[in-house]
Amino acid sequence: MELALLVNTNLLENPSDFIRFVGRFHHLLVHLPIGFLFLAAITQFAVRWPKFHPIKPFLVYLWGLGALSAVLAVLFGYLLSLSGDYDEDTLFWHKWSGVAVLVFSLGCYYISKKQGENLNIPKRVLVVLAFGTMVYTGHLGGNLTHGSTYLLEYAPNTVRNIAGLPPKTEPRPKVTVLDSADVYLDLISPMMSSKCISCHNTGKKKGNLLLTSYNNMMKGGENGEVVIPGDIEASELFRRITLPENHDDFMPSEGKRPLTDTEVEIIEWWITSGAPQHGFVTKLDADNKIVETVSKYLGLDKYTILSKEVTPADKSIVDSLRNQGFIINRLMKDNYFIEANFSLSERAITNVDLDLLQNLKEQLIWLDLSNSGLKDEQLEKIGQLENLIKLNLKGTPISDNGVQYLKKLNHLESLNLYKTDVSEGLLEVLPNLTKLQKIYLWKTKVNDSLIRILKSENKSLEVIYKREEDFK
Amino acid sequence: MSKYHNFMQRPLSRREMLGICKGGFGALAFTSLFGAMPIGCDRPKNLAEGTDLYLGPHYLPKAKNVIFLYMDGGVSQVDSFDPKPRLAKENGEDPRKKFKVDATQFDNVGKILKSPWDFKQYGECGMPVSELFPHIATCVDDIALIRSMTSKFPEHTNANYFLHTGSGIQGRPSMGSWMTYGLGSDNKNIPGYVVLDGGLIPPGGLDNFKNGFLPASYQASILKAGAEPVANIMPQEGITNLQEEKLQFIKQMDNSLMGKMGEVDAVSSAISNYELAYKMQSSIPELTEFSDESKATKKLYGFDSDDVHTRGYAAQCLLARRLVERGVRFVELTCPKVEADRWDQHNNLKDGHERNAHAVDQPIAGLLKDLKSRGMLEETLVVWTGEFGRTPFAQGTNGRDHNPSACSMWLAGAGIKGGTIFGRTDDYGYRVIENEVSVHDLHATIMHLLGINHELLTFRFGGRDIRLTDVHGHIIKDILA
């Protein structure tokens, strides 16, 4: 058969390529016998009921279609198997059970044609055999393509136990702080899982290379080691992923989704730093640039305090603060973050109030103490409300001495100091407030040169320090 | 339920019967079960964990307050924010030869009419604004302009109801009522939803600002311009505690009525309204007293303008800022009564639009700048819109008729991406051809910025959980920061 094809296509320069090309149609054709034989089998049993008698005459054609498509599937499957990309053992069983499907379905067709649609014992046995082998073959085929772990990867652990598989590996908890990110488990391994192991797994094992674990990766493949710790030039893995995409050796091959530039950059850094199996990213020799890249890759730049689950605020504290003139509102339905607003109270804030607020430290993210008469020394207590995102202190008699206490508020995004006495003291505070986006400084003691410095130190900070006048 | 009748029914209903039998304690549980708000504008104190009585923002809000600048009558889009050079080229030609002309209200279709005003680009974003709004033009970098607003109604009254309540038919709750219902008000001494009456109540009347089927506490309170913003705001009783005693007596009577009838919104709202009115005697005079505002601030808003209407609207804008400062959730400003009708120039477009624009332009720009410098624009959403647009062709010779197929509007402040232009109209500014925005979309977006999921804030009425956006509404994501 193969020979005949070769003779017929002698114009082609590379016949084995042509065979591969044709062979891959197996994936398409293989679904036809599955569908036809499945339909034929259920029809065969269904026609026992009078309701389904009208479809009896079509049975023989269904078996015929099933058998014919099985012939094609087997033929193309054989061509595909010549590529040698698949696990030998599984392939052997897949091939021969496929042939069995063909034989049984031909048998069904033959008997249907000879004996009509009635179901006698030998026919029943044949139908069951055809159906059974088809299911088995299909399953093996799936294992060949997707890897043998694919089917039960997300199955409940009880199902996995029955199949003799180990319980599901608990997914790594989502990294929320860069300091806790492990270089292999949180960076390299997820990349391999999503981009590489569909071919380099125990089932397919292309190039005899396994990328399912650190040890296997270090072992290398048929051409030797692929990762040489510390030597990026000699690492075949890195060479393959950085080739031009149309290059023969480019990985991932066959048009599968390539690694992103960020992923390549991280792999490069990992290999250069000696390809360690374990280690926190920040403990390794990581410069600012790679730290930034990694936190972006892990989505840490979007992480805010709001991603944290907090417990409900103590109701008695909330009630007593409300009685003191605070307005306290919950800010979202799915979490218990709150805002506290003292700006509508007509009295000055006291230390007792501030002590009460400490109890809401975890939940409190917006605080409005405008015109509350807050003093410098009282800011020490405000500085301990670490989760604050918005802080409004406008119209209070605070100055440079007081704002120093705010250094620890590193979640702060908006700080309103309108109509306060702050000035150069801000220079010491603002570098600590890395998330700050807006600061209001109209009617304070800041001058133009200070504003210039603040703006140049943090380009993304919006400094509002005056009111635009009418143009006339 | 009897609470949905405008007038109290006397025959005892089954529910009222139950209410009486259950007594006070049961009645309390009854109201909570049905999701009604506790008495008064204050939001419920016990946002208990694990109950479904949650009211308040669904997700972290961007805006805490809304100032809705209502441009009553319908500003002409091609003369304000949507320049169309083709109108100048084809000025005087017959529009019916150029495009399909819809029926207009007055069926007096004239020639294509070019804009009497020139446009210039402003700000870093280069947004074009006409000569009508030289002051607002200086704020374009904070403004997200929508050129593709539409309405379903070509006539003022229905269009007003539609814009304010999401339904063209009278009787639905106003958006301000919905938002105070959903979020409550931070200030116990001033109502949560305030309309500043600049002189013109829009066609459709006060039903634009009503609570509809929501509890009566959520209707708008209307403050008039001038010395006495609220009628009888000064107590008339000579003896100090006489008024308190009177009120105490009325409350006692009302409570005993409620004891007999069970929870009736008309009565419970009346009780809370009396209480609020009492508190307003001190809060309102303080609010409308501008002596603590600096000269520079007043000048910025336009208090020293030659135009009496500019001065009037300036006071309204400043008052709006002061209301928002005091935690009022939703403030709507209606237009001043200039000598040329509302923005509804069926004739004398040039004169009428110029008068209206002159009255509002500087105060609005002043408001935006003032809010920004105080850090308030970060949590206040400012919305500027009319109920529909106007035709690019003349009505008669020098006016423009109603056009619900395209209208320009803008938003600024909390959560808004300044300097954006969203949506596009055809070459004449007659119809929307890209990114059409409906009133429901606007409502959904305002609610989104306040932290409310417009699909979740409902009130059961007539057997259905009704929303401000009914079954419509998509958040306009492109204008959000």
Image (cartoon, rainbow, N blue to C red):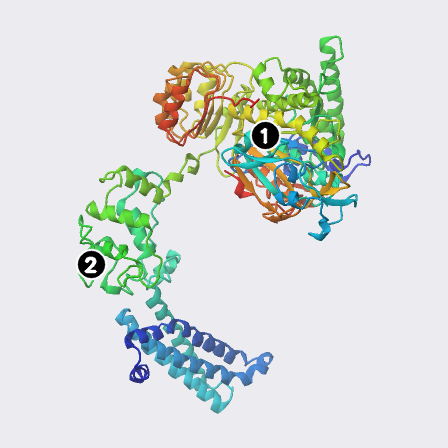
Residue at the outermost right position: B11
* Residue B266 seen in render: yes
Answer few, some or many: residues within 10 Å of disc 2's Cα (few below 14, many 20 plus, some between 14 and 19). many
Answer few, some or many: residues within 10 Å of disc 1's Cα (few below 14, many 20 plus, some between 14 and 19). many
Disc 2 or disc 1, which is closer to the eye?
1
Please state if A97 lies on the left or on the right of B272 as rendered: left
Residue B301 percent across, percent down from the top left: 61, 22
Instruction: Using the rendered image, report if marks 2 and 1 lie on a common chain.
Output: no
Report in which chain the residue with disc 1 lies.
B
Q: Which residue is mark 2?
A: A220
Please state if B186 lies on the left or on the right of B392 as rendered: left
Residue at 41 percent of width and 86 percent of height:
A107
At numbered mark 2, what does the secondary structure look like: helix, strand or loop?
loop
The C terminus of chain A sits in image quarter = top right
Foreground pick, B78 / A367 = B78
Foreground pick, B244 / B41 = B41
Residue at 58 percent of width and 47 percent of height:
B435
Report in which chain the residue with disc 2 lies.
A
* Residue B168 seen in render: no
Residue B49 percent across, percent down from the top left: 52, 35
> Label for residue B449?
none
Query: Which amino acid, mark 2?
Result: Gly
Q: Which residue is mark 1?
A: B136
Q: Give yes or no for contact between labels 2 and 1 (Cβ–Cβ under 8 Å).
A: no
* A41 lies above or below B401: below
Residue B124 percent across, percent down from the top left: 49, 34
Query: Which amino acid, mark 1?
Result: Ile
Rendered image quadrant of residue B105: top right
